[in-house]
Amino acid sequence: MNSNNDFLVLFLAPVRDFLADDGVSEILINGAGQIYVERSGKLELTNAKFASEAQLMAAAVNIAKSVDRILDERHPDLDARLPDGSRVHVTIPPISRCGTIISIRKFKKDMLTLEKLEKLSSIPHDGVLLLNAIVKLRKNVLVSGGTSSGKTSVLNAISGLIPDGDRILVLEDASELQLQQRHCVYFETRKPDKNGEGEFSIRDLVIASLRMRPDRLVIGEIRGGEALDLLQAMNTGHSGSMSTIHANSPVDALRRMETCAILSGVELPLNAVRMQVDSAINCIVHTMRLPDGSRKIVDISEVLPLKDGEYQTSPLLKWNTRSIAQDGSVSGDFSLCNKPSFAEDANIMGLELPKYE
């Protein structure tokens, strides 16, 4: 382990082997006596334990101190980034009923590319062609999916298609994205300090970034009122931007974006917000974790004009689950659906698209 991880080893010695294991993506500590890890999308109960609840609590408090935060009964929740880039979330009693709970999502040193996702059968070659055209045509993209469905990894892979000459501003709550282009500027939110001061939210970052001449904005995740600022940016010249959002389907992603925009506190008629969402978001890439633990891009859809005030999408490519075996393994295939409306534009730019019938 490198020197950056000495901090982790000191406070989290019982899980040091999992921190060093590149095959482990998440570590879930449910009190002193129960520790799970995630490998290849599946959870495993380990034999590792902390000696006592007091030892685990001490580790949590020391993590909080290292990021200048307080963790106690009045402040029983902590979200932070560790020195190696991993994200950690801690909850303690009284809001946790079974002792100190620590969740660690490890920082991926080697981010996935679309080529790697294709080799893993997470996306077919037709899907790669579609995404390449979508990005090169500067379509605004929303990557949607449930928790731990691979949204951030897919966003990072898609961002790799952005031309190297663009100025890209990357805004995140916790630094995870690793773009390869030369002209990338990274920003990260800041939590309030132990005195409740100094907070700089993702919405603050979006507003500030618009004064920095971005060609494209890449936002790690949309969760609240920053949605409205992003929509306005997308609708006023910052095309080709992209982000992620928690949602169960492409249409649900648009509804979630609408809800987040309403949380901005700006009083706008619902129809006006809906029209902003519909005009700003061009394509939705939906991800899913399947029962066997594998993660796939299960839907690439184009956003259509509102119909009777309701969101409409046109699937361009979909994953079809054909069977699920008793051991959880999943069989299925990808299929092309509707030809994209931007097919002619892609042809003019010499961009290859799948062969639609």
Image (tube, rainbow, N blue to C red):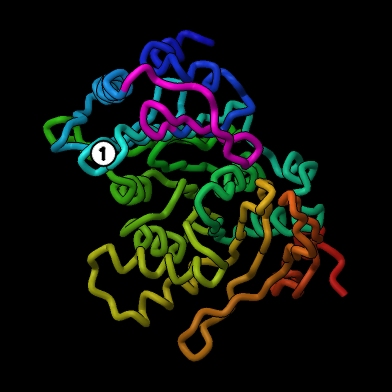
Q: Nearer the viewer, residue 287 or 71?
A: 71
Residue at (23, 65) in percent of width and height: 265
Residue that carries the numbered disc 1 in the rendered image? 77
147 is within the stretch colored magenta: no
Q: Is residue 322 visible?
A: yes
Residue at (51, 30) in percent of width and height: 106
Task: Please say if 350 is above or below 258.
Answer: above
Quarter of the image for the C terminus: give it. bottom right
Q: Is residue 129 visible?
A: no
Q: Quadrant of residue 153?
A: top right
Task: List the single residue furthest toward the bottom.
Answer: 308
Mark 1: which secondary structure? strand
Picture coordinates of residue 351, whole percent (x, y): 78, 57
Near mark 1 (Cα within 10 A), the count class, few <14, some 14-19 or many ≥20, is some
Residue at (35, 50) in percent of width and height: 206
Q: Nearer the viewer, residue 173 or 23?
A: 23
Residue at (35, 59) in percent of width and height: 229
Picture coordinates of residue 64, whole percent (x, y): 27, 25
Q: Quadrant of residue 22?
A: top right
Q: Going by the image, does 243 lie left or right of 112?
A: left
Q: Amino acid at mark 1?
A: Asp
Picture coordinates of residue 161, whole percent (x, y): 67, 46
39 is within the stretch colored magenta: yes
Q: Nearer the viewer, residue 349 or 114?
A: 114
Q: Nearer the viewer, residue 132 or 258?
A: 258
Task: Please say if 337 is above or below 122.
Answer: below
Q: Which residues are magenta?
A: 29-52
- Total numbered badges shown on the rendered structure: 1
Picture coordinates of residue 5, whole percent (x, y): 46, 14
